[in-house]
Image: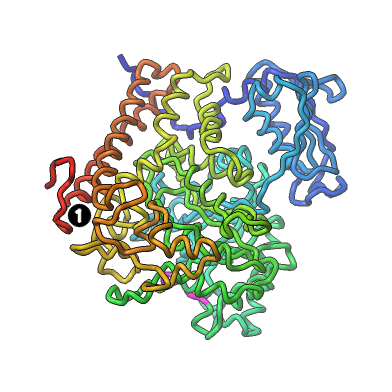
Amino acid sequence: MRSEIVVDPAPHPAWLPDGALAAVGRRRVGLRLPELSGPARDIPGADPDNSAEVASTLRAEVDRATTAHGGGVVDPDDSPDLLLTLNPDRHGFRFVRDGGRVTVAASTPTALLHGWFHVVRLGEAAFTGPDADERHSPAFALRVLDHWDNVDVHPVMGQVERGYSGGSIFYADGRVRDDLSRVTTYARLLAAVGIDRVCINNVNVHAREARLLTDDLPDVARVAAALRPYGVRTHLAVSFAAPMTLGGLPTSDPLDDDVRAWWRAAADRVWATIPDFGGFVVKADSEGQPGPFAYGRDHADGANLLAEAVAPHGGVVHWRAFVYDHTQDWRDRSTDRARAAHDHFAPLDGRFADNVVVQVKHGPMDFQTREPVSPVLAAMPAARLAIELQVTQEYTGQQRHACYLAPWWSENLGFRPWGGEGDDGRAVRDVVASGGIAAVSNVGDDRFWTGHPLAQANLYAFGRLAWDPTLDPATVLDEWVGLTFAGPDGAVHPRVREVLHAVLDDSWRTYEAYTAPLGVGFMVRPGHHYGPDVDGYEYTPWGTYHFADRDGIGVDRTRATGTGFTGQYPAPWRDVYEDLATCPDELLLFFHHVPYSHVLHSGVTVIQHLYDTHFAGVERVREMVAAWESLADLVPAAVPADVDARVRERLAEQLRSAVEWRDQIYTYFFRKSGIPDAHGRTIY
């Protein structure tokens, strides 16, 4: 008989429950930290952004863990089991295990805090096994989470645009929250996976949010103060039109001297108020947002305007490359949204200031379940590029579906734009090393942070891959399970681990199987983007078409007969994608319009693949549901009752939605093509 569900009003601990700290908490821990009165400038080589506040946080973390689990804080010279020490000669942190004793050394308090959480993540394994001497540092210079949060509740997009986890953790009732303690708890979760920057407002900057830069700057400083104890820096999204809407100027022309002076003064005020402020994020000339095009200028002109303003403070400008014509005529097949970012940005390579990061969505469209890597990532060798991912599941089930995205992100980060030959064997993760990685957060004020408790795995995985993009997604998932479902002694029931892998390991491919096929994308309800609507966007101005007719389906993006998009890739991919004989099946309909009878590399026709995968996808979801239900006897001993209830509710919706996807896709394409299913399954 299932226990009564008791709802805890406190936020779910995610991957830092008390049990996750059992292994370190049982140990004798020594800290060798200087008494810092401010930024750690008295440590040679230290980053001045790492202040005494972070060192104090680290002391509190150690006290909390050892008090809870029976260990203790000892003198650093008293042979502690774990020694945490500042060392000016280190980048990142160094982990040394010698005879079962562990030393973590780092040059800054923030790096040492990351080292502490590394030991927490390892658990008992940190102290066992052979001696080791390891150096750990993040692969990416910048690791950013973008929150699409609105200060006011937007009449269409709500409090959090593309948010599926309740309201904002930063704002309520049209202003910054009075109580920001949950923001500090959030910063703790981020520090535990190595994320060090957060943009706290929507890139679609509305009139109310624009004032964060001016009138509300003291409240932004309060948010920064809530994030700072864990070494997380604050960024703001700003409107390109701010000199007009906030400053009363008649223009926002990036080459106008008064506009330049306004932005310099604005930046000076921000850094005077928040000395460790990170910088600005800008969406310009995209989906109705203002930008430099209005003045006959280009994106380099616009980005460099802000770069000049923030440069004296060491700030950065993240300038998004998500730019396309959202008023496209659906009748015009020569216009291709996929081409737009490359067309706009590749010719500008070499013109962006050093402190501009061009932030490029991982694919050329819009965070689809399957699309190729954006060719922009291979087209701008002189620019600092960042890859942008989406942790919030706008097109992957909106946190109502279990869909573990780390395998998809790993494919993108590991993609080799030049095919792996010589120096051009660099992967995307190498290309963006200096510009870093950004992602749209999936966090809200929901008790479980992410709506679906299992969607926490995506937030965790983003942080881990942002630190080390070579990590195996299954290993990362196992880490998350081991921390999140740790019992009081730090152990996880083996069946819980087994079931979570069964549910999540292949969940992205399962989602792909029952939704839009073979890379064609979209087929979702317009506006909110949830659930199937095969023709929902087909005759709209958004450029998201599948061109299905009675004979075939797909978008011809070849150089020979289509939009020429394949030509934006370097060799060998420009030719691999161009040729039907070599184009990967999973991207076939992104690059080619083919007959339903076209035979895939797998040996089945396009239409039969479409039928088969949608039925198979539903059956996989049934297996996910059954796997989770097999844990019923472990509730609440190994799985909290409220987690179980929420996961059951979400899995039931996933199954209902998967069936709806299957039946609509299956029926639509039978009616369109007239080709029956070889297996004779029911068509409506």
Q: Is residue 427 magenta?
A: no
> Callout 1: few (<14), some (14-19), or many (20+) C-alpha neighbours within 10 Å?
many
Depth check: 420 or 79 in front?
420
Q: Position of residue 304 (x, y in %)?
A: 64, 74
Give, as a single range, the part of the protein colored magenta.
287-291
**Rendered position, 489 above or below 425:** above
Q: Find the residue positioned furthest to the top.
A: 1
Q: Residue type at mark 1: give it.
A: Phe
Q: Position of residue 383 (x, y in %)?
A: 65, 67
Is 379 on the left or on the right of 310, as rendered? left
Depth check: 248 or 511 in front?
511
**Rendered position, 565 above or below 480:** below
Residue located at (58% from left, 25% from top): 20
Depth check: 484 or 100 in front?
100
Residue located at (27% from left, 51% from top): 605
Residue located at (74% from left, 38% from top): 112
Q: Position of residue 368 (x, y in %)?
A: 40, 55
Q: Label 1: which residue?
A: 669
Residue located at (37% from left, 57% from top): 588
